[in-house]
Amino acid sequence: MSQQKSQLRIALLQKRRDYVHSLSEQQRQEAGEKLRRNTLTLLKDKPPSVITGFWPLWDEINCRTLLNALSQKHKLGLPVVNMDKNVLEFHIWTPTSKLKPGSLKISVPATYSPLPSPDIVLTPAIAFDFAGHRLGYGRGHYDRTLEILRQKKQVLALGLGYDVQMIDSLPHQEFDQTVDIIITEKRIIQRNT
């Protein structure tokens, strides 16, 4: 299974990279704006919540304008990798927060201020399928973290990405955590159960 996932990860990373590099800078910004609108539409009736976002890496969809918009109503955080426990911790982020490179060269808040346990987790991925499975980067941080969070309370996991990252089916194992809803620049996809 891990060999199959590794090969698929390489192919789907290349697919996303090729797609994103075919877009102009304006098209990338428009995709981020459409993602923002779709996400805010989905969450419009949610009471103020604690939400964790992510700072986009490489060819991930730009969710920065979404984070700025969410910060107007919700308490936000960004993930910080705890390398000792191999899980994510979340630290408070606002649009004025300074960032610094963290583990794995992921931008994290420069001031570590723990975020309360999140109600909503925005998750990146290389690909998603219609059953809510996600193919991540292979370290399992989101799977382990979502499992821990979901043992404590109900947590809504939202997968964010380009529509081209949707595929019919992904290989998965029993410990893989699914996302509840996938949001792209084109649509909101409720997971097939």
Image (cartoon, rainbow, N blue to C red):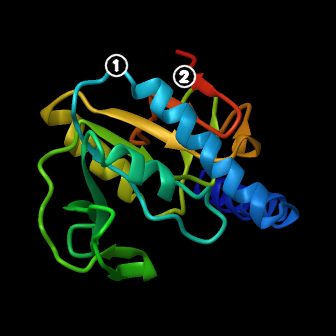
What is the distance, in whole Å, between disc 2 and disc 1 at their CAs? 20 Å
Q: Where does residue 147 sit, x and y in percent of width and height?
A: 28, 41
Disc 2 marks a residue whose amino acid type is: Arg
Q: Classify 10 Å Cα crowding around label 2: few (below 14), some (14-19), many (20 and above).
A: some
Q: Residue furthest right?
A: 22
Disc 1 marks a residue whose amino acid type is: Asp
* Viewer can see residue 179: yes
Which residue corresponds to the image point at 46% horizontal and 33% vertical from the top-left? 40
* Viewer can see residue 133: no
Q: Where does residue 154 sit, x and y in percent of width and height?
A: 22, 27
- Image position of 81 with respect to 101: above or below: above
Q: If you read the primary sequence from the N terminus, does the residue marked by circle 2 or circle 1 appear first?
A: 1
Question: Which circle, 2 or 1, is nearer the viewer?
Answer: 1
**Which dot marks residue 45?**
1
- Image position of 112 with respect to 177: above or below: below
Question: Is mark 2 in CB contact (under 8 Å) with mark 1?
Answer: no
Residue located beneath label 2 in the image: 191
Which of the 4 quarters of the picture holds residue 121? top left
Choose between 36 and 142: the one closer to the eye. Answer: 36
